[in-house]
Amino acid sequence: MTSSTVPWRATVLTLFPEMFPGPLGHALSGRALAADRWSLVARDIRDFATGRHRSVDDTPFGGGAGMVLRPDVVDAAIADAADDRPLVYLTPRGRPLTQDIARRIAAGPGVVALCGRYEGIDQRVIEARAMQEISIGDYVLAGGELAAMVLLDACVRLLPGVMGTAASADEESFADGLLEYPHYTRPALWEGHAVPEVLTSGNHAAIAAWRLEQSRQITQHRRPDLYNQYIASGAHAP
Ligand code: 6GU
C-alpha cells in the first residue's frame, strides 16, 4: 500500500465506546467512513484496568470532589494504540481547537484521541506521554467524547476526496480569516423579502466585492478578535 491509499486512522480511547461512531457514522463523515477514506476504532479504557476490582479511577490526592483516571490504566490504553499518530487529550484545560490545528492533524496519518471523564486524568501520564491538550471552547462538557467527535469531524471533512468540490473547502469561514458571507437561493422573493439585487445582476466582480464586504462587516461586528487578526495579516490589502 502507498501512503495515499492508507486511510487516515482515528482511535478514540473512552469509557463510553458505544457513543461512537454516533453522528460520525452519518452524512459526510459517515459516507467517507463507509468508503474507507478514514477508519475509526473506539477502545474501552476499562479493558485496560487490572486488579480485582478493575477500577479505572480513584479519589484525588490532596482531597477534593470527584474522581481521577488512574495513570497506569490510561497509559496501558495509550500503549495499545500508540504509533506514529499524534496523541490528543480532549480537555477544557487544553489549547482552543482551530481550523489550523484541524488542518495539521488531517494532513498526518490520523489521531489517537483520549477522552476524559470525572475530574480528569492523573497529570503524570499527561506529561509522560507528551499529550497535546485540546479544548473545543470555553464551556464545560460532561466528558471529552463530544469534543473528540468535533475534532474528528473537523479533520475528516478535510481529507482528500471527502468533500465534493475543492472550492467549498477554502471559500468558507476561516479559510481567509473572515466569517462567511450570507447565502440566498430561490424563490427570489420570499414572504416579501427580496434577494440582494447584486446577486441576480450577473456581474461576477460586483458579486465578489459585495460578498467580501459582507464578510468584513459580519466579522468586524461578531468577531472583533478575528477581524483585527485579518487586518494585521494584511490579507485585506490589494
Ligand atoms: Cl475537550 N472536554 C470537556 N469535558 N469539556 C470541554 C471540552 C473538552 N472543550 C470544551 N469543553
Image: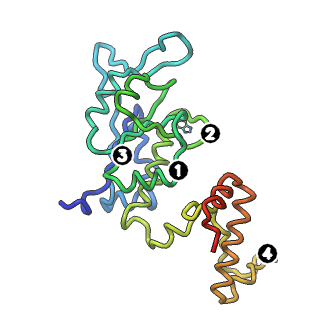
Task: Give yes or no for contact between labels 3 and 1 (Cβ–Cβ under 8 Å).
Answer: no
Position of 3 relative to 185 (above/below) = above
Rounded to the nearest angstrom, the CA distance separating label 3 from label 1 is 16 Å
Count residues near mark 1 (Cα–Cα under 10 Å), then give few for <14, some for 14-19, many for 20+: some
Secondary structure found at label 4: loop
Amino acid on which the number 1 mark rests in the picture: Thr
- Label number found at residue 98: 1
Rounded to the nearest angstrom, the CA distance separating label 4 from label 1 is 38 Å
Rounded to the nearest angstrom, the CA distance separating label 4 from label 2 is 38 Å
Name the foreground residue: 180 vs 41. 180
Residue 140: x %, y % from top left: 59, 34
Rounded to the nearest angstrom, the CA distance separating label 4 from label 3 is 47 Å
**Mark whose residue sits in front, 2 or 1:** 1
Residue to which mark 4 is pinned:
191
Residue 193: x %, y % from top left: 79, 76
Secondary structure found at label 2: loop
**Mark whose residue sits in front, 4 or 3:** 3
Residue 234: x %, y % from top left: 62, 64
Residue to which mark 2 is pinned:
138
Name the side, left or right, on which 194 lies relative to 154: right
Rounded to the nearest angstrom, the CA distance separating label 3 from label 2 is 23 Å
Name the foreground residue: 219 vs 190. 219
Give the mark nearest the N terminus, 3 or 2. 3
Q: Is mark 2 within 8 Å of ligand 1?
A: yes
